[in-house]
Image (cartoon, grey):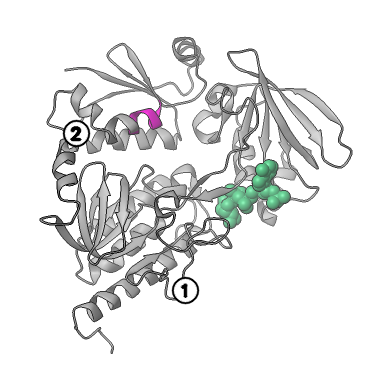
Amino acid sequence: MPRIKMYTTDFCSYCNRAKRILESKNLEFEEINIHGSAEMRDEIEELTGRRDVPQIFIDDTHIGDDDDLAELAFSGKLDEMFNREGEGTQMEEIKKNSDGNGLEERNVIIIGGGTAGFAAGIYTSRAMLEPLLITGDALGGQLSLTLDLENYPGFFGTEAAKFIQGMQEQAERFGTEVRFDRVTEVDFNRQPFYVKTYDQAYLAKAIIICTGASPRTLNIPGEEKYGGRGVSYCATCDGFFFQEQRLVVVGGGDAAMEEAIFLTRFASEVYIVHRRDQLRASQILQERAFKNDKIKFIWSSIVEEIQGDGEKVTGALLKNVETDETQVFPIDGVFIFIGHIPNTELFESVIEMDDQDYVVVDNLQSTNIEGVFAAGDVHDHVFRQAITAGGAGAAAAISAEKFIAELENRAYPGQ
Ligand code: NAP
């Protein structure tokens, strides 16, 4: 049996994601936490050329990070490597059944396992609808990239990882079935609706879309080339690689402030590069950043290029947008926190979206297709908080319950 080894650090949300993938496949692994060990950090850098975690090996083969592992898991290749009957082998049968005959039929399918998805799970399971929640890649959604929760009433200072675990346990306790899988295709032009994943295909009377949003990239030269080699989107995961080094953080929102403050645990200096001369972040986080001696601001500036020596980042080409002056800023790492884009690719030309690709919903969380609802950052580009996503998930669940009752000519409670 091949042996799996995973290098991790403390607070690494992407590592948690990789662990959950392996746990969902019942695969044992050895975790090597390199946090605090400069020797192991250098060793992993030498072995892989990477300055990010997790880094995963199967026997002596380096397979990459959590994204690479997810690809292997969802495509069935991981099962093949372990000579197991992969559930992915059902695909031929699924293709045959794409007209929907003989497929497992559910009341509600919730697509996405963040705060909105789990809130929808809790509410629809308490309505005895036995929902199926398909988590997608990032269990916990954007909270999985956060350390602590400070602004969710009742959860002051709670670790985000514990909060996510709690949401899942709560949803499961009431009867939500949680599957670690990724939806690959939907057909909402039929009732019941058709949903295909890597592992399975289903029919459902109602759908709640809670696919959230993913970090936005700068799309500048050097960003992709030096990804994991000095370019990072997760301070808590990768900060440890930058002990006593100089870092740039790009962005002026809450995430940029929070992550820049976290990075000062390791870095000698953190330069926040923001495209305007005013921050977007909340007052409390602005104050904390301004007060931190290790944080300096480079205002009205953008990063035009990330430069390196072929192996790792060595500098950032900065341009002042007011004067057009440019400078090469010597730096060891660039952390990018410039907001998010909604995860709606799957629903292109299927449901109505606005000009920024957010799903359009009415005040009952209903999309333009009757029986298809959406909640959370996939439709909300104004508030984007865990608490608002949770509220929207609950509302979508109540609307879905009502929709199913009407579909089945049943009285909806309270009517
Ligand atoms: P955000 O609030 O949308 O901020 C994104 C920042 O990136 C803005 O300052 C924006 O500049 C900048 N930006 C966008 N595109 C850029 C580009 N192409 N080049 C350079 N800069 C660019 O995103 P966020 O900070 O990720 O926060 C998302 C949501 O989560 C917010 O609602 C936030 O309140 C919440 N959040 C809360 C907490 C907390 O409360 N502890 C922590 C993290 C996030 P402009 O300002 O010029 O537009």
Is residue 286 visible to the viewer in this orientation of the structure?
no
Q: Earlier in the sequence, mark 1 or mark 2?
A: 2
Horizontally, is 337 left or right of 317 in the view?
Answer: left
Residue bearing mark 2: 26
Where's residue 368, x and y in %?
A: 42, 70
Where's residue 246, x and y in %?
A: 69, 24
Nearest the viewer among 311 and 257 is 311
Secondary element under disc 1, as helix, strand or loop, is loop
Look at the image and say whether residue 252 sits in the magenta stretch. Answer: no
Nearest the viewer among 109 and 168 is 109
Q: Nearer the viewer, mark 1 or mark 2?
A: 1
Residue bearing mark 1: 362
Task: Look at the magenta stretch and give its main secondary structure.
Answer: helix
- Residue at figure coordinates x 82%, y 26% from the top left: 327
Q: Over which residues does the magenta segment extend?
A: 65-70
Q: Hey, which quadrant is residue 210 in on the image?
A: bottom left
- Residue at figure coordinates x 72%, y 31% from the top left: 304
Q: Amino acid at mark 2?
A: Asn
Alpha carbon of mark 1 to alpha carbon of mark 2: how far?
Answer: 41 Å
Is residue 243 positioned above or below 254 on the image? above
Q: Residues within 10 Å of mark 2 (few under 14, many from 20)?
A: few
Mark 1 and mark 2 residues within 8 Å of each other at the beta carbon = no
Q: Which mark is residue 265?
A: none
Q: The N terminus is located in which quarter?
A: top left
Q: Hey, which quadrant is residue 297 in on the image?
A: top right
